[in-house]
Amino acid sequence: MIRNVLENIGGIEIYPIISLTIFFTVFSTMLVYVFTRKKKQMDKMAGLPLEP
């Protein structure tokens, strides 16, 4: 039933492409952010939840 509904909606084929592009952009940005941080800064941020 759901398949029939989705087949009849016009212009829906662009949404998977947009969502994949957004996911890939966010994922890539986070990878670059994580791997470019200095170790000292990461250690400081890792201890933040434990500080009173």
Image (cartoon, rainbow, N blue to C red):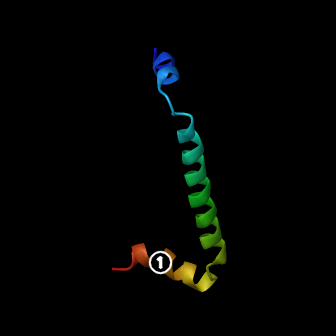
How far across and down, in percent of the image, does residue 46 sit? 50, 75
Nearer to the camera, 23 or 34: 23
Q: Quadrant of the C terminus?
A: bottom left
Q: Is residue 23 above or below residue 39?
A: above
**In the drawing, does residue 38 fall left or right of residue 52?**
right
In the picture as drawn, the residue positioned furthest to the left comes out as: 52
Q: Is residue 31 above or below residue 22?
A: below
Nearer to the camera, 11 or 50: 11
SS class, disc 1: loop
In the picture as drawn, the residue positioned furthest to the bottom comes out as: 40
Nearer to the camera, 49 or 12: 12
Report which residue position mark 1 lands on: 47
Which residue lies at the image location 62% right of the left edge and 54% below the top edge? 24
Q: Callout 1, which amino acid? A: Gly
Task: Indicate the quadrant where residue 29 lies.
Answer: bottom right
How far across and down, in percent of the image, does residue 48 sit? 43, 77
How far across and down, in percent of the image, does residue 7 sit? 52, 21
Q: Residues within 10 Å of mark 1 (few under 14, many from 20)?
A: few
Which residue lies at the image location 48% right of the left edge and 21% below the top edge? 8
Q: Is residue 45 above or below residue 17?
A: below
Nearer to the camera, 13 or 49: 13
How far across and down, in percent of the image, does residue 32 sit? 64, 70
Q: Is residue 11 above or below residue 41?
A: above
**In the drawing, does residue 10 fall left or right of residue 28?**
left
Task: Indicate the quadrant where residue 34 lies.
Answer: bottom right
